[in-house]
Image: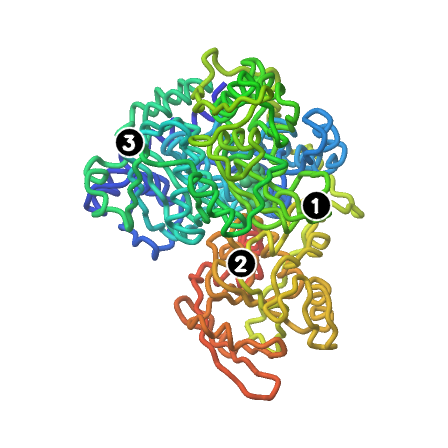
Amino acid sequence: MVFDLEMIKAVYARYPERVAAARKLVNKPLTLSEKILYAHLWDGNAAEAYERGKSYVDFAPDRVAMQDATAQMALLQFMQAGKTKVAVPSTAHADHLILARLGADKDLQDGINKNNEVFNFLSSVCDKYGIGFWKPGAGIIHQVVLENYAFPGGMMIGTDSHTVNAGGLGMVAIGVGGADAVDVMAGMAWELKFPKLIGVKLTGKLNGWTSAKDVILKVAGILTVKGGTGAIVEYFGEGAKSLSGTGKGTICNMGAEIGATTSTFGYDDSMRRYLSATGRADVVALADEVAEHLTGDAEVYDNPEQYFDQVIEINLSELTPHLNGPYTPDLATPVSEMKAAATANDWPTDIEWALIGSCTNSSYEDLSRAASIVDDAVSKGLNAKAILGINPGSEQVRFTAERDGFIDTFNKLDNTKIFTNACGPCIGQWDRPGASEEKKNSIVHSFNRNFKKRADGNPNTMAFVTSPEMVAAIAISGKLDFNPITDTLTNANGEEVSLAEPTGMELPPNGFAVDDNGYQAPAEDGSGIQVVVKEDSKRLQLLTPFAPWDGENITGAKLLIKAEGKCTTDHISMAGPWLQYRGHLDNISENCLIGAVNSFGGATNEVVNQLTGAKGAVPSTARAYKAAGVPSIVVGDHNYGEGSSREHAAMEPRHLGVYAVIVKSFARIHETNLKKQGMLGLTFNTESDYDLINEDDTFNFTDLNQFAPGKQLTLEIVHADGSKDNVLCNHTYNSGQIEWYKYGSALNLIKAEAAAQA
Ligand code: MIC
Ligand code: SF4
């Protein structure tokens, strides 16, 4: 069955006219990204040419996806919006809450028992409001979206930063906070600053040990974790066409790791093959009718420098396998240089665990390539030195891989663990034996993120990101610095053998199969369905609206924390064990900023309460200020809020009485999340003003009462000795966003508007 075919038809029917209108105004050949953006304007045909990186534009996305860890908050907000049904096709996916421990079946059942209340809540909200629900075990959101919903030229948003994965099928798919999803599900426009465009020209063809993953590992090394900020990365060239659909998905997926708004590829044969193999020949037929609009114009790809803001060229024929890490996904080391790098940096080289999975690399092709390595190794008398853990991306992938013998192949190794079709270790849902001893060690995985503590909670675990086939090879060798291209291994008979290059299958030769894909369709009429949130629940809490702004300046604020260095959403609102509180704002606020490094003293989760002089945890100190009626602020470094889309990272400080977050620079999604939740998100006009801030300062916003688009705000810093500094802060609020601030949150504004209409 093809989901929402009528919607896709309608999108394609609009394409020719919309692209023609844009072409006239932009007045030059168009990139694919521009075509998709202009084809999805809220107001219909383009009336002006937008300025990249400047214009705020209202869009009309075609669909919304949410995963369980963010859907709870998104849907708790949606329940307040006063609507009876979602306005666009939407889905929720139960994938983040299942702990990897013993193996698939046992873990899934445990996960269901433990999270029953949340799953029931999601299932009933979805049923009520017309949202498709993918039950626990159905698979990871982005793999399920790619298999069922993504379509070339479409636009979607999702409450997860890796929503961008759907770019692999030629979408503009963007990760957002739950409040943005609420806008779209409530039938309103969705706003985005018109992105800049980075073109990546791929020439040549992958070969040997190199895979699609290495393209993005390389790009991350070039652009760094901030390099894609505010931009869509568009891949093109012969090399792009030679990549599989899911390989393109992998590349787009990790675009999140360079801060890119999204990444995409033009419609081509690999997409046709993937769509057909996943039962969507009807979509191919429709897309073919407008195929010229579903890729960039030839002139653009012939002279990319004239049309993109930045162009990168990568020759796939020369690309070699990479390992990125530890602690950051942009520290790229070619496999051939790993021996030297590991020695120089004192990275442990013994590997105990090697993990394949996550939305980045859990497709049929990924499993087939990794299985080919295992098959070859076993046939040469090798076994694995490390434990190989695998989370298939979806039940369809798992079922088909099992039918085709890959699961049996993996199980030929003594130490294989097949976990649930879910996020698992990728998001810290992993009961790794011994992790609490905090031993220094390295792991390798095919995931996308490798921030400190992410997979197993141990700050001394160094995680390296690589391709599934490299993970398999490293699992067998047990060595981080094993180079399968040049190194040999000693087998059970004492012979030196080398591993053969991976071979894989882009798609299952006998087609995909699945028994029960885990989908639950919503009720036709949900009006009678009751959504239950128990008063005394520890997991779910109905939301109390945030207070509106009183129109006054904020004065007498204290510093909650000045965070130093990397402060990702994992530092602001940790995942792992905290995922259980994602639907309960007060309870999850107990993790607020507990991972951030205090620039005074370098400790985590230890700050001084300026009212008492006592040291305490960040959340309790914030609560103490709030109880005393004293506003607080947070100060941060570069790319603050990098990583996830979780709006908890904005809602928690807001809930705890923080009024403003002032940083050197923000990650896009987090900045928007702050705005949506009625917070002040500001950047230092002069970066070094960060250094002026002392632990015991008091802060006054002296001209907030004149808050206006494009007008800087002044922060008066009163030092303990009475001396003062005035620093200028920049902001990117437009007039609509200032309204959110005035109302206390974007949701408050939606509610007020709905009430006015009623
Ligand atoms: C992640 O990979 O960090 C997550 C968990 O999928 C998040 C969403 C979340 O925090 O729930 C993301 O990337 O947006
Ligand atoms: Fe799940 Fe990991 Fe993908 Fe996030 S990055 S959606 S946690 S698999």
State which mark lies toward you, 1 or 2.
2
Q: Residues within 10 Å of mark 3 (few under 14, many from 20)?
A: some
Asked if the residues shown at circle 1 and circle 2 are in contact, with their CB atoms under 8 angstroms apart, the answer is no
Q: Which of marks 3 and 1 is nearer the N terminus?
A: 3
Residue 707 in percent (x, y) is at 47, 70
Residue nearest the observer in this picture, 117 or 370: 370
Mark 3: which amino acid? Gly
Q: Which amino acid does label 2 sit on?
A: Lys
Kindly identify which numbered label has been placed on residue 566.
2
Image coordinates for residue 28, horizontal then vertical, percent: 19, 44
Distance in Å between CA atoms under marks 3 and 1: 44 Å
Instruction: For marks 3 and 2, give the CA distance.
Output: 36 Å
Q: Is residue 66 in view? A: no
Q: Which residue has dot 3 on it?
A: 204
Mark with earlier residue (1, 2) = 2
Compared across the picture, whether 306 is left or right of 76 comes to: left
Element type at marker 2? loop
Q: Name the residue under label 1.
A: 577
* Camera-nearest residue between 44 and 169: 169
Q: Can residue 292 be seen in this view?
A: yes
CA gap, disc 1 and disc 2:
21 Å
Q: Where is residue 54 in the image (x, y as percent from the top left)?
A: 34, 57
Say few, some or many: other residues with alpha carbon within 10 Å of mark 2 (under 14 / 14 to 19 / 20 or more).
some
Q: Which residue lies furthest to the right in this view?
A: 536
* Mark 1, secondary structure of its residue: helix
Amino acid type indicated by mark 1 = Pro
621, above or below 78, in the image: below
Coloring applied to the structure: rainbow
Q: Where is residue 750 in the image (x, y as percent from the top left)?
A: 54, 52
**Neighbour tally class for label 1: few under 14, some 14-19, many 20 plus, Cα within 10 Å:** some
